[in-house]
Image (cartoon, rainbow, N blue to C red):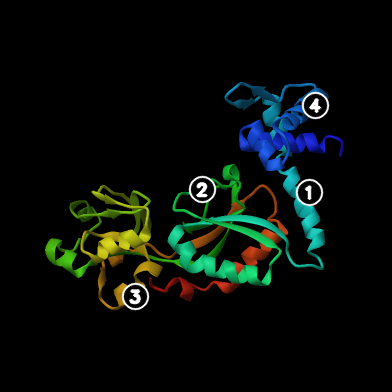
Amino acid sequence: MQNWEAMEAFIEVVKQGSFSAAAQKLSVSASHVSRLVTQLEAELGCTLLFRTTRRIRLSDAGELYYQQCRGLPEQLSNASELVSTLNKAPIGRIRMTCATTFGEHFIAPLINDFLKTHPKIELELHLTNREVDLIEEGFDLAIRMGSALKDSSYLSRRLCKRREYLCASKAYVEQYGVPHTLAELQQHQCLIGSKNHWLFQDNGQTKEIKLTGKWRSNSGLALLDAVRKGLGIAQLPDYYVSGDLANGRLLSLLSQYQYPYSGVWLVYPNVQQPSPKLQFLCDYLTSHFSHERALLNY
């Protein structure tokens, strides 16, 4: 493949956003990357990148070329990997991301067990409550909470069921009372997590209630502690509150409007079929994860 090295350099420049970052990724010099891209442009007879001292920008031809070629390096890697894994253990690097607390308590232990029996896999587990752009940030897999994705850029598999409960402490209810309708939530102290809305179901229809409040955090554990201490009402997943609901420490509110089971999903880019190593990891997670595991209380 005559232009393979130049093509790979061009793809990496676009992905990384600069020649220096692409060079670091490819373990070569920035000048070498620049020569390869210039060579590719000369062979194609067109400008692929507009360069300035601060940034690069794709030309129309560059955008077309990039869209056609961006998956080729990974496809070649996957083809080699697929052949090598016919009679061998899975091998290669996987970057995955998950919400912090869920990842620490449920995913990391499974991943660690997986790596003990598959030492040729290199795995990076990035825990964050920010929704990562898998394609732009170079991740292979994400574990996401909620409803099934409708974005055609991604494929998904359900890992387990999940149910959210609207909760408050006895102390809060004694002081402020119990809301009886969704509209009454506006009169209460709503503790807000990473999203500014809660989901409910009313007569078979999904209702999204937008929230305002003086307390907000992207940490589920911080949110749980605030609810336990009577600071307000919050909507939290079963794996946070099942124990507190069972022993009466927290009360479930507006159960007649409770949203049906959503899910925890394995999500990966829909640029091609999942690589053999990624498919192997997804199969492992789904086979070793149970809904009962997710109902454990912190």
Q: Earlier along the polypeptide chain: callout 3 or callout 2? A: 2
Which disc is residue 39 wearing?
4
Distance Cα–Cα, label 2 vs label 1: 26 Å
> Residue under circle 2?
132
Q: Is residue 257 left or right of residue 36?
A: left
Report the amino acid beneath label 4: Gln
Q: Is residue 202 visible?
A: no
The CA distance from mark 3 to mark 4 is: 64 Å
Residue with the mark numbered 1 = 76
Disc 4 to disc 1, C-alpha distance: 22 Å
Which numbered disc, 4 or 1, marks the residue closer to the eye?
A: 4
What amino acid is found at the position of numbered circle 3 in the picture? Answer: Gly
**Number of callouts:** 4
Q: Quadrant of the N terminus?
A: top right
Labels 2 and 1: the sequence-earlier one = 1
Which of disc 4 and disc 2 is earlier in sequence? 4
